[in-house]
Amino acid sequence: MSHQVNTASEIKVLIDGQETRVKPETTILRAARTLGISIPTLCHHPAVEPYGACRVCTVELKRGKRSRMVTACNYPLREEGLEILTQSERALRARRLVLELLMARCPEVKVIRDMAREAGLEKSRYPQGDTKERCILCGLCVNICNQVVGANAIGFSSRGPDRKVGTPFLENSMDCIGCGACSFACPTQCIKMTEENGVRKIWGRDFKLAVCPVCGNYYAPIEQLEKIQKQVNLPPDHFKVCFTCRGLKL
Amino acid sequence: MKKLNNFQELEQYRQQLKKQVAADQVVISVCGGSGCLAFGGEKVAAALEKEIKKAASVKVQLKLTGCHGFCEKGPLVVIRPQGILYTKVKPEDAAEIISETVVNQRIIDRLLYKDPVSKQKITKEDEIPFYKNQKRIIFGSNGFIDPTSIDDYIGIDGYAALAKALKGMKPEQVISEVEKAGLRGRGGGGFPTALKWKTCRNAPGEPKYVIINADEGDPGAYMDRSVLEGNPHSVLEGLIIGAYAIGSSHGFIYIRHEYPLALKNFQTALAKAREYGFLGKNILGSGFDFDVQVNQGGGAFVCGESSALMASIEGKLGEPRAKYVHTVERGIWDKPSNLNNVETWANVPIIINKGADWYARIGTDRSKGTKIFSLVGKINNTGLVEVPMGVTLKHIVFDIGGGIPNKKKFKAVQTGGPSGGCLPESLLDLQVDFDRLTDAGSMMGSGGMIVMDEDTCMVDVARYFLNFLKDESCGKCTPCREGIRQMLAILNRITEGKGLEGDVEQLQEMSGGIMDAALCALGGTSPNPVMSTIKYFRNEYDAHIRDHKCPAGVCKALVTYSIDPQKCIGCGVCLKNCSSGAIKGAKKKPHKIDPKKCIKCGICYEVCKFGSVKRS
């Protein structure tokens, strides 16, 4: 009895012909994944609010005879009787358009090329952009920095085709703590981060790394440890040893 | 001024104001809209004021009002009660206007409007075709009131609708009245206003916000600016009534920074409304509290989109978000927020005052009331026109607009702003309403109407609007940011004579994809200029691509200028005007253009009186 699911609060949805029941407000993407249906994404990350910028997860949503296009990552399922088509001709046309445009913008980015190939595109018909360009402006780095790290060190500047990701006025930002979450989350690995001789370089700044007194390894930028310690209100010596050694000690 | 504490005090005050104005009071109304001010309207008003002071024998009231609409002929001066209209008035005319017209009741012939068709001079404002063919329920008051005077507004029954709503109507009744009237949003979408209000009212969450969208930004459109400049209280009154209906105590106006006069007049209106007790606590003793905060835009076109506008009010980056959950449910700070544009709010007091039945008799089945259009481009009577929904394009362009200047042929009219569409001559009989414009591949938008003549290249028009949209795309989503840019590249190559077979089909395919995949309505409608010009002017695309010709002679790369030696009399006018020294020729001998030096500016073509310069 205790394991009975309250089905009344769930809604029925049909995705590519497969039926499932989800809690209201579940996104199409989540519902599809529980069915094992894969929808490509670029700007989506479970740690941040869906942003809906890249548009590769565009799918067709049918309500009776009416059909419209929505992004799977942020469309909340709230009503009965919806049918979602992730592979319809219209959905594929939209996805191909997005990928072809991104391929033209960033000709050398593998993840885009692979995704495009899967959608049936070998190359882009549009004039190719700079082969060094890797940023697809999905905004994941900005959203991670804002919502997860809470540093707000990077953001967007300019608009339209001139839009850029960077620190304010593209100058060295004192708000950056060198955590590298942006670089880690970037789907196209376009945010450069290097580590050498105890110094991490990112966004034009050098961050001194803390040394673990137990194992002697560098483990994280000092600024990052200080910020997290203050932000979460941890004891001052909480980050004294590296994460591995702390685990061993416990 | 003492605060008006209840409905009775308001009515008493109104009667008192009305008594002060005698029926035969001479009122000179000088248009102070941005257009007339640019022509020197303020100087005309100052000169008239000086003359009025001199002529002590007559009692004249001078009003610097908002825009009258007939911007082509500014500065405009109207003398009431007769309703005499003088056009293109200069400060030097002031003395004569007072001594002749006001004192001696004589008409000054040279200042009258001359009808270009009948060649007749017309004395009265309401007799000239431009005004006669309009129905100005929103815009008409502009000419009668000083926008900085709340008393003027109260004098024309201002705030009577608010009193009526607060006194005798439940919020739900206000909403149902607006519903019965059939009011639809004037900002572009045409969404039923009452449905929006109802959803917002019923949405869980407090506080609720109501907002005036005054971020008008379509090229060539200035209806909202002129309503705000000329009759700010009508918009404010609509907002207060809406707030009461929705259950909101906090309002915003989001006004673009480029509208300083509208901002100033609206701020004056707010201050006066607070002083009189139309804003603040316990409005007119009804127990209803409401006030308004002013937010200025920073120049981004996209901030006219509801979710971007609300992000901007929150102090965030002005970019749209998905509206799968509507802003009426989760808007500013995730609270229910109801946004309507300036003109929509201005319709509300009229509906409440005159009743839904009266209002619903104007217009077509599914589009009620009137719409203000800004009629610009290749048109004789540039200006703002208000017509009932359902009149034909022909009526607007020819009967009101006076047709195309310089005996040129009409080619197209672009409606709906940059993401609207171009409608050809064959659709001149189309009745203008929300649904018919959309069905024809264009849209109502906020009311821009740009008329184009035979010298307009439709591929170039599509290119122009796409270029605007490229610059104004926020850049958040891929289809809009990258797609418009790539479509523009194709259009550029077509206008340069480098178009390829299949380009049109590719543009159509991209348009379909962008419409489906873009995040917001601006991106989703951005291919409209291309789609509609392909739909109605496909032959022009083909001429550019296949024959490397620009039929209208606009696209420089595809045009050459030459002089017909048979027709050239060697007058030398073209030679004198040529800025690049490309024209050579002895006096009274046929001249020649050196194609290597010619920059194709077309000045020779314009100045030749003998038609000897050929453009091909």
Image: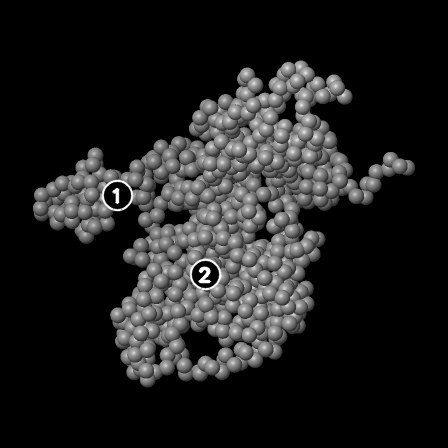
Residue B512, given in percent of the width and then of the height, sits at 52, 39
Above or below, comparing residue A133 to residue B246 in the picture: above
Q: Quadrant of residue B30?
A: bottom left
| For residue A170, above or below residue B301 | above
User: Observer-nearest residue: A182 or B400?
Assistant: A182
Callout count:
2
State which quadrant residue B515 falls in. Answer: top right
Residue marked by disc 2: B264
The amino acid type, in three-letter code, at marker 2 is: Lys
The residue drawn where x is 39% and y is 60% is B34
Q: Residue at x 42, y 37 (%)?
A: B488
- Which residue ends up furthest to the bottom in the rendered image? B57
Q: Chain of mark 1?
A: B
Residue A97 relative to residue B116: left or right: right
Measuring from the top left, give residue B2's x and y in whole percent. Answer: 55, 74
For residue B601, the mark is 1
Q: Given the current orientation, which residue lies at the most extreme top position? A: A215
**Secondary structure type for disc 1:** loop
Looking at the image, tell me whether mark 2 or mark 1 is earlier in sequence order.
2
In which chain is the residue bearing label 2? B
Pointer 2 with pointer 1, Cβ within 8 A? no
Residue B559 image position (x, y, % from top left): 28, 40
- Quadrant containing the C terminus of chain B is top left
Label 2: which secondary element = helix
- Residue at 63% over, 16% down: A217
Q: CA distance from mark 2 to mark 1?
A: 42 Å
User: Residue A106: x percent and y percent?
Assistant: 49, 27
Tell me if I can see residue A89 in this picture.
no
In which quadrant of the rendered view does residue B477 lie? top right
Nearer the observer, B561 or B167 = B167
Residue extending farthest to the right is A1
- Asked whether the residues under marks 2 and 1 belong to the same chain, the reply is yes
